[in-house]
Amino acid sequence: RNRLGNPRLQEESDSAVRIPANDLNTIRTELEEIIRDLDGLLKN
């Protein structure tokens, strides 16, 4: 149960967070590229 005491809300938010591992790897790669780009911009 979440803090609001509504178990159904908690279940929905839990299921929304389940992302396949290969999607997570793709997201991580893209984030790393974005961070590198931002890093380059900040250093200029």
Image (cartoon, rainbow, N blue to C red):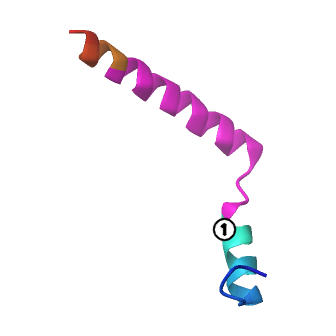
Residue 42 as seen in the image, left or right of residue 24: left
- Give the x, y percent position of residue 26: 61, 36
**Residue in the image at 43% along x and 25% along y:** 35
**Residue in the image at 67% along x and 84% along y:** 9
- Give the x, y percent position of residue 10: 72, 78
20 falls in the magenta region: yes
Look at the image and give the residue range highlighted in magenta. Answer: 17-38
Residue 10 as seen in the image, left or right of residue 37: right
* Main secondary-structure element of the magenta-colored stretch: helix
Crowding at mark 1 (Cα within 10 Å: few <14, some 14-19, many 20+): few
11 falls in the magenta region: no
- Which sits in the foreground, 8 or 34? 8
- The vertical placement of 22 against 30, above or below, is below
Give the quadrant of residue 4: bottom right
Give the quadrant of residue 27: top right
- The vertical placement of 11 against 6, above or below, is above
**Residue in the image at 41% along x and 28% along y:** 34
- Give the x, y percent position of residue 25: 67, 35
- The vertical placement of 25 against 36, above or below, is below
In this view, which residue lies farthest toward the left?
Answer: 44
Give the quadrant of residue 24: top right
Q: Name the quadrant of the N terminus.
A: bottom right
- Give the x, y percent position of residue 2: 72, 79
- Which sits in the foreground, 29 or 44? 44
- Disc 1 marks which residue? 16
- Which sits in the foreground, 17 or 6? 6
Which structural element holds mark 1?
A: helix
